[in-house]
């Protein structure tokens, strides 16, 4: 091969390698729809100048734009819980009367669907618009949350499972009337240190049908439907892996290894990308990163990162939702 030809081949290989690594780092990712972030109360310390009472739209270059949603003069502790065809579901706390409210926002109008004297976590509205499932504190232990169902028309709430839940893992409705949620495994309350949290984070994704019958699906948390209910994304904390579980074949496939996922991931509208918070311990600090990753695990792009002292971390990170 002539010298000039070798030079051209070498240049092509170098350029191809550069493009490959740029592709792997998500340089060519595009967001379809909008990625929204809302913060837990008194948290989001890793995002500069963000207000935990507001909801933000996130861009791939790490910019945050507060979105106008409705008047919140009487509420604080605002969280965007769900974006559905019916409207946006928020949960908020009335700062004077101290009750929790689940609010439906449609075209700028606000409707109160539910109120509760105790905390409401991850309210999820069923397609029929008449039932909400959510996590609430159990009466037997203030640190344990249980699964409840609220009927909007009857204005009644009922505990549908006595199994303690992973309260930072969102419940989801199944293709039928069933509900999928993450149940706690070996439970212990950690007040100091990240290592103790490992025992708390052991979990099993459970299915509860309309008759209240429980079925263990797979060890893990953060379930997300894909392929029209044929499979589930989920996270195995013990293995530190993001996986896909085939419902029919009952087989799991790993798409990302050595990953410490801190919050429930969000799946893009087109089903191509996952957004999630990842944590890495660096000495006395926890580095929190927001990533967007292709569902096959090949492309992964960091949106932002920041350090949080381990002493102040309490598993509370901002919540993510993908919507239009």
Image: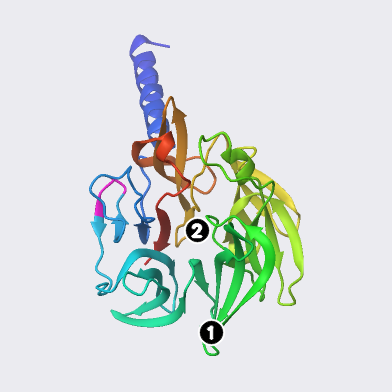
Crowdedness near tag 2: few (<14), some (14–19) or many (≥20) residues, C-alpha within 10 Å:
some
Q: Is residue 314 above or below residue 76?
A: above
Residue 66 location (% of width, % of height): 24, 60
Q: Which mark is residue 112?
A: none
Which quadrant of the structure image shows residue 170? bottom right
Report whether residue 25 is seen.
Answer: no
Q: Residue at x 51, y 83 (%)?
A: 129
Residue at the bottom extreme, as displayed:
153
Rounded to the nearest angstrom, the CA distance separating label 2 from label 1 is 27 Å
In depth, the one of 281 and 6 nearer the eye is 281
Verify CB contact (< 8 Å) between mark 2 and mark 1: no
Residue 290 location (% of width, % of height): 39, 44
Q: Residue at x 37, y 58 (%)?
A: 32
Magenta region, residue range = 60-64
Element at badge 2? loop
Q: Residue at x 71, y 59 (%)?
A: 247
169 to the left or right of 292: right
Q: Quadrant of the N terminus?
A: top left
**Per the image, is 52 magenta?**
no
278 to the left or right of 230: left
Residue 284 location (% of width, % of height): 42, 27
Report whether residue 3 is seen.
Answer: yes
Magenta stretch, main secondary structure, is loop
Which quadrant of the structure image shows residue 213? bottom right
Residue 144 location (% of width, % of height): 60, 57
Residue located beneath label 1 in the image: 130
**Per the image, is 61 magenta?**
yes
């Amino acid at each position: 091969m002539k010298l000039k030809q070798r030079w051209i081949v070498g240049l092509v290989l170098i350029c191809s390698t550069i493009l490959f690594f740029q592709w792997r780092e998500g340089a060519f990712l595009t967001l379809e729809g909008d990625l929204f972030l809302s913060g837990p109360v008194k948290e989001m310390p890793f995002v500069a100048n963000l207000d935990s009472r507001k909801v933000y739209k996130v861009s791939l270059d790490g910019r945050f734009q507060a979105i106008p949603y409705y008047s919140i003069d009487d509420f604080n502790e605002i969280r965007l819980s769900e974006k559905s065809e019916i409207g946006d579901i928020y949960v908020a706390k009335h700062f004077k009367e101290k009750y929790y409210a689940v609010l439906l926002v449609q075209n700028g109008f606000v409707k109160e669907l539910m109120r509760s004297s105790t905390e409401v976590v991850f309210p999820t509205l069923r397609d029929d618009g008449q039932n909400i499932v959510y996590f609430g504190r159990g009466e037997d232990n203030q640190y344990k949350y249980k699964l409840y169902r609220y009927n909007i028309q009857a204005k009644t709430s009922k505990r549908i499972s006595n199994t303690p839940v992973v309260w930072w893992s969102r419940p989801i409705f199944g293709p039928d009337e069933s509900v999928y949620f993450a149940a706690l495994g070996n439970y212990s309350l950690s007040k100091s240190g990240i290592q103790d949290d490992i025992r708390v984070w052991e979990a099993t994704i459970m299915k509860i049908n309309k008759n209240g019958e429980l079925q263990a699906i797979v060890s893990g948390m953060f379930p997300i439907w894909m392929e029209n209910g044929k499979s589930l994304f989920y996270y195995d904390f013990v293995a530190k892996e993001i996986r896909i579980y085939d419902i029919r074949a009952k087989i799991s496939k790993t798409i990302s290894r050595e990953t410490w996922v801190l919050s429930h991931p969000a799946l893009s509208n087109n089903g191509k990308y996952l957004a999630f918070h990842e944590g890495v311990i660096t000495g006395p600090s926890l580095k929190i990163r927001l990533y967007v990753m292709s569902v096959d695990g090949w492309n992964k792009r960091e949106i932002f990162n920041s350090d949080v002292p381990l002493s102040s971390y309490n598993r509370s990170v901002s919540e993510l939702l993908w919507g239009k």
